[in-house]
Image: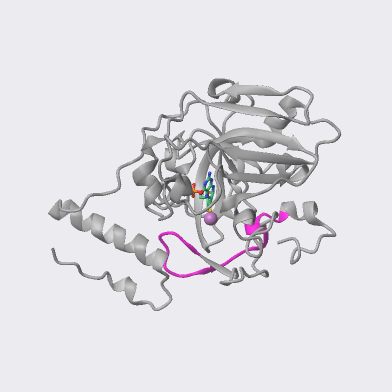
Amino acid sequence: MLIRKPADLRYSDVTPKQLYINRRRFLAAGSAIAGAWALPTPAGATMKLNNVVKSAYKVDEKITPREDITTYNNYYEFGTQKEDPAHYANTLRPSPWQVQVGGLVNKPKTYDLDSVMKIAPLEERIYRHRCVEAWSIVVPWIGFPLAALLKDVEPNAKAKYVAFQTLYDPKQMPLGNRAGIELPYVEGLRLDEAMHPLALLAVGLYGETLPNQNGAPIRLVVPWKYGFKSIKSIIKITLTDKQPPTTWNISSAREYGFYSNVNPAVDHPRWSQASERRLGELFKKKTLMFNGYPEVAGLYSGMDLRKNY
Ligand SMILES: Nc1nc2c(c(=O)[nH]1)N[C@H]1C(S)=C(S)[C@@H](COP(=O)(O)O)O[C@H]1N2
Ligand SMILES: [Mo]
């Protein structure tokens, strides 16, 4: 098969990730003719979500194609390469599912999926989502405010933080032992961050339930923080009085802090965070403070965001 390079790949500033996306597109276009290339198989079936209201929380930018959002993923439990989760996450069983919410609350509860989806009306929110690796996407998420779930269990006066945990079942996640990070994946927010109206528990994207590779059946989305804070396939939420451990901080504290707010002025030790590449676009764009969500700034007033990276 003749492989020609698309003309746009000549630009010297194209990163390997971007090359990967463009190359895959090119190969996919070729395969339609030649039929010789196996395309990523979608991991698990998704279902249409009904009764979703459009939210005013939407950025006025081009939405990233579903194909990119669902085939270029970080979900280390299903492999460490970007294309791995779309290939391997079909072993995740997102139903039946339970989310256990407890700790420093008055009304600890275990929710099944049906009951969690009734916490608040489902909204479609179009958010920017930026990975610490300097690529970004614009996603039409479906979900409800994390605050609604937290209010339902009534945090008590001692609660200061919220800890989240992903499922870790080696049977469903056989590549987990090669993830190179401690599992289960854990994340955390300060309680006031968690209560901010932008913090979303997502159960879908593009009008349907979440594909497994995007964190089915329920995942966090914190649009002003680097993508790794947006923990996938959550089974446990615990209110605590101490700052909870977080996976990437355990893995490399120097590189990944607890806060991990998108901040173009604070570089990652190994690369700049000043700009980012939108998947599917060729030229970099400037990264915005708090990923373009300045309304969260008040959460951090008086804090040195270089120290609290
Ligand atoms: N459980 C779990 N959650 C996770 C990850 C992971 O490896 N495991 N990766 C994080 C990272 S680094 C990013 S950038 C986002 C990616 O979300 P997306 O694949 O839906 O774009 O998920 C985050 N949540
Ligand atoms: Mo990431």
Q: Nearer the viewer, residue 72 or 89?
A: 89
Look at the image and tell me whether residue 29 can be seen. Answer: yes
Tell me residue 298's x, y (percent). Answer: 80, 53
**Residue at the image point whose x is 53% and y is 52% from the top:** 181
Tell me residue 180's x, y (percent). Answer: 50, 54
21 over 105 or under it: above or below:
below
78 over 264 or under it: above or below:
above
Q: Is residue 58 left or right of residue 153?
A: left
Tell me residue 199's x, y (percent). Answer: 66, 42
Q: Is residue 39 left or right of residue 13?
A: left
- Quadrant holding the C terminus: bottom right
- Give the total number of marks visible in the rendering: 0
Q: Residue furthest front?
A: 177
Q: Is residue 212 left or right of residue 245?
A: left
Look at the image and tell me whether residue 75 can be seen. Answer: no
- Quadrant holding the N terminus: bottom left
117 over 43 or under it: above or below:
above
Q: Is 288 inside the magenta-drawn segment?
A: yes
**Residue at the image point whose x is 51% and y is 58% from the top:** 136
Q: Is 69 inside the magenta-drawn segment?
A: no
**Residue at the image point whose x is 67% and y is 62% from the top:** 289
Q: Quadrant of residue 8?
A: bottom left
Q: Nearer the viewer, residue 292 or 92?
A: 92
Q: Which residues are magenta?
A: 277-294
Q: Nearer the viewer, residue 195 or 158?
A: 158
**Residue at the image point whose x is 51% and y is 38% from the top:** 168
Tell me residue 207's x, y (percent). Answer: 45, 35
Q: Residue furthest bottom?
A: 12
Q: Nearer the viewer, residue 269 or 34?
A: 269
